Image (spheres, grey):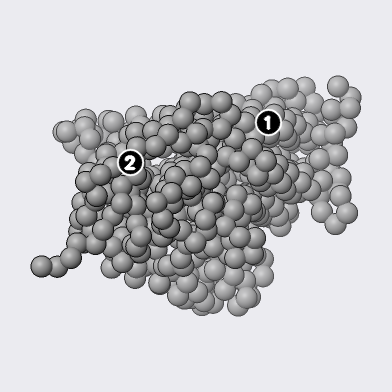
Amino acid sequence: MRQLEKWTDWLCDERVGPVSAAVAFALIYCLTQIVVMTLASHFVGTGVGVDDSEQLMEMRFLAAGYGSSQPPLFTWLAILAAALVGTSVLALKIVKYGLLAAGLVAYFAAIRRLGYSSRAAAAGMFGLLLFPQIFWEMQHALTHSTAIFCFTSVLLLALVEVQKRRSAVSYALFGLATAAAMLSKYNIVIFLTALFLAAFSLRETRAAILDRRFLISVAVAILACLPTAYWSLTHPQDFLSHSGGFGVAGGGSAARTAALGIFGLAKAILNFAALPVAVFAVAFVLARRSPAPPPQPGPWPERLLWRAIAFGLLVTLVLVLAGGVTQFRDRWMLPIFVLLPAVLAMRLDAMGERGRKAQGTIVFAGAVVAILVLPVSWHMHLNGGDNRGRIVRMDYRALYDQLTADGPVTTVVSSWFWIGNLRLVNPGLIVLDDEIPDFAQSIREPAVLVLMGDKEPPSVVFDRIAKAGYAMDTIHRSVEVPQLLGDMPRQVTITRLHRITAQ
């Protein structure tokens, strides 16, 4: 037990060369995931999951937008990584864990720049690893949510620098961080609104917002977002393609819709924040016998973060009621509660020895959870789980050989983006599903349609093919694609596509 306490104190207070031990842990952790997952995929031969396979489809070309109701920044970073290391699992993992590491380090740095102890910064950073959506969901799925996590942390650090320095450079960097957050995931608007309102409500930060140089931030953010904003306006169907996932007016009557919305929001909040709140509470209880000074009012950084969380909840509730939203995903709460571990860890700094012990417990819990998740994340990376997750186990080299058995193939079309894994076999392949913008202009012959017995109805892609001026062969070829790790083969139907000749 004593050794565990020493290890925790080392994480909280010591350094590894020029960086904090906590930061070194985060960097080594993310580097380990990049190396292990890449090597595991290389030796076993498995593909990647649904979110990563979608990126494989999209990172073939640089564009201001890619549809699927998601901003393009993650894909831009994936294109950059692929330019350096090739279209591969390595490129995808470099982006994902690079963003995760950058977000953790920026979060740590923001707490330190606000004047709090290294122990508080470590507790805040490891407190993030208690969110299931961060320590688990981001490790085996999710792409854009990883980007929004990173750039909410970067945005917080940029705001702190603006308040501290009030220089033209700091305002420009704040604008750039704002743009990066906007281009990560659109629900960042809630975080931006909440942070702006909180900063404007405090005397200590209001002056930084009212400074004329704040216009530099606004100008930089607008200029950086302008291409994607224009793309969204000119591609409204692609921009709003997933808007049905909010369950708008799903309750029928206004009262029932509002009740469902409030209940769904409360459930999402509970699912997202229950574990870290519980761990912080247990940590405080375990340290309750340690001495603590009399309570003091929280300094302005704590009030800023508490107000940002409160404004975030208020803005979300207004949007839910005004928009008639009834369906939620837990990860949508990230822009609201990403600040929670920081503000709790900062409050513990004012509690003397009691706070130090509680911070140590949080660091220990976060580190242990992160380490325990490692082998499970490797298993999920190679096995993918059930149903759609099993796409990682298909032998895509064997499928590609089947596709090209009758001649070369330039374009592969399918009803959803599992087929993006084929670009791990042939990076030059054009792979499309019905959500790819400019579908008709992207097809290059020879082209084939590949369908698997999945849950996506193929009728939509049939319509896209017809509107693009192509027809399907009347002869379909059904093949068995082997699955790795002992699974039974999967049935896949292959159909050649031909351009319809104008009469």
Judge by depth and name the residue closer to the eye, 359 or 250. 250
Residue 45, by quadrant, is top right
Contact, mark 2 vs mark 1 (Cβ under 8 Å):
no
Q: In this view, does 348 lie to the left or right of 220?
A: right
Residue 43, by quadrant, is top right
Say above or below: 294 vs 399.
above
Residue under label 1, please give it. Answer: 375
Find the distance from the CA under tag 2 to the CA under tag 1.
39 Å
Amino acid type, mark 2: Arg
Q: Does the rendering let one see residue 73?
A: no
Amino acid type, mark 1: Pro
Q: Is residue 321 left or right of residue 344?
A: left
Judge by depth and name the residue closer to the eye, 382 or 156. 382
Say above or below: 342 vs 163.
above
Residue shown at 53%/45% (left/top)? 397
Residue shown at 54%/68% (left/top)? 176
Residue under label 2, please give it. Answer: 477
Counting other residues with Cα less than 10 Å from the Cα at mark 2, is it few (<14), some (14-19), or many (20 or more)? some
Residue 383 drawn at (x, y percent): 56, 31
Residue shown at 44%/51% (left/top)? 404
Among the two numbered marks 2 and 1 on one chain, the one whose residue lies closer to the N terminus = 1
Residue 382 drawn at (x, y percent): 59, 35
